[in-house]
Image (cartoon, rainbow, N blue to C red):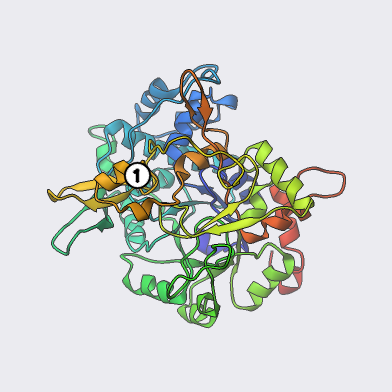
Amino acid sequence: MLTDTLPTIIQGGMGAGVSDWRLARAVSITGQLGVVSGTALDVIIARRLQMGDLGGHVRRALAAFPIAGVADGILRRHFIPGGKACNAPFKSKPLPSERPSRAALELLVASSFVEVFLAREGHNGPVGINFLEKIQATLLPSLYGAMLAGVSCVLVGAGIPRSIPGALDRFARGEPAEITLDVKGATSDDHFGTRLCPSELWPTGASSPALARPAFFAIVSSATLATMLVKKSNGRVDGFIVEGPSAGGHNAPPRGPLRLTEFGEPIYSDRDLPDLEEFRRLGLPFWLAGSYARPERVVEALRCGATGVQVGTAFAYCDESGLTPEIKRQTLAMSRAKTLRVFTDPVASPTGFPFKLVQLPGTLADPATPGRAARVCDLGYLRHAYKQPDGSLGWRCPAEPVEDFTSKGGGESESRGRQCLCNALLANIGLEQVRGEAVQTRELPLVTSGDDVIDVARFVQPGSDSYSAADVIEYLLRGTTALNVN
């Protein structure tokens, strides 16, 4: 079990497919915690299959999927031998919902299984999976699929994941689990939830097996939230990732009224610094995150009582990460030239959380790059649930077409400045959608990283133009030998 031997380094679960199975596997082989991103894995696996599944990795993992008939159905619906034509669009799939179809449910479970299976293949190191609590509709089947593959640890941030520990407990026993959805406009008399009964996935007469319960680490920004989760979660919390505002991806909003710099970025203060003494009092392991990718900062974290650090950005641009080679090349070149910039955008993400954007030419974060001609919401992972006038559950996204959003009761001001992260994050890993017929366009990337991306080229050794995940681990652990840490 992971909690028997705790890692010093946790590799962050980044983006959609940036922390893919290759990266997690490379980190886990070193004995540290490699983590796959659980975001949008169903569409990622479907698109890898439509690209022809180069190397046969997805098909090899699907062949090991334990529920009979599921793999055959997924291959029949999504696999294209030799891959689709480069100018052909990817096939669409149903948007996530609280009651997915059987085919959508099977794809969600199998896709998490595939990514964890591949990350664990051929070694005994620990593998984790990271989820955004905000993406609630897909959480339960994704958790179950990861557990079927033997995941060691589940990490959840971007929300208040009180229901996740109990779901892990119930799935480990083969029992149904339920999550209450956050629904705008709902009252205490309403009950909107999503449920998964493992036995319903298995053929008639087959019982769902008992599974190992993975450790659960909540990603938090304050000791107040951590304390609440320890006291009020529906199951055991095993540890915390304490993430500061310099970390990549989604950041917790600043405490108090939102104030912006002259450039339009949120202003953080000492109030937003975590109280490490409170974390120590909780008596649970914790890792510090946000600009800790230096040996001296690892030592500093250990001396403060942390078990170690979580690092994302340093791994995002290594050889094994899922970012496209062009994005890695461009970022490393701009880092060397000292021209790289990061902007913390308070409105870009449909979640409402501040979101770090790397100002790369040719991406949606570059003011000189023409954006999409029109909004589109055809993946829907970041949609919000809301109560419709008739009392039923509806879904809307601040980044969808404004007229669609306002027709569902959303305010026009809520949609201002929003970006479609779902499509952009898939473009980051080379799985962008192709649109149009007479004039074709491709979805543009939108890259997120922590503040220290500006110096990420420091990992590239003289005479080389890239670096590996193992290089990052070796660099980070310098200086820990005297502390008897490895």
Q: Residue 30, position in %: x, y?
A: 67, 52
Q: Is residue 364 above or below residue 252?
A: above
Side of 88 where 399 appears, left or right: left
- The residue lying toward the viewer, choosing from 22 and 454, is 454
Q: Visible in this render: residue 18?
A: yes
Q: Residue 372, position in %: x, y?
A: 49, 37
| Residue pictured at 25% horizontal, 49% vertical | 194
Q: Would you identify the image quadrant in which residue 411 lies?
A: bottom left
Q: Residue 464, position in %: x, y?
A: 83, 43
Q: Is residue 481 above or below residue 453?
A: below
**Secondary structure at numbered mark 1:** helix
Q: Visible in this render: residue 319?
A: no
Side of 278 where 464 appears, left or right: right
Q: How many residues crowd around disc 1 within 10 Å: few (fewer than 14), some, or many (20 or more)?
A: some
| Residue pictured at 79% horizontal, 42% vertical | 465
Q: Is residue 351 above or below residue 18?
A: below
| Residue pictured at 36% horizontal, 55% vertical | 413
Q: Is residue 378 above or below residue 188?
A: above
- The residue lying toward the viewer, choosing from 253 and 402, is 402
Quadrant of the snapshot with the C terminus? bottom right
Q: Residue 403, position in %: x, y?
A: 31, 42
Tag 1: residue type?
A: Val
- The residue lying toward the viewer, choosing from 342 and 475, is 342
Residue bearing the label numbered 1: 402
- The residue lying toward the viewer, choosing from 41 and 427, is 427
Side of 486 where 11 appears, left or right: left
| Residue pictured at 36% horizontal, 24% vertical | 73
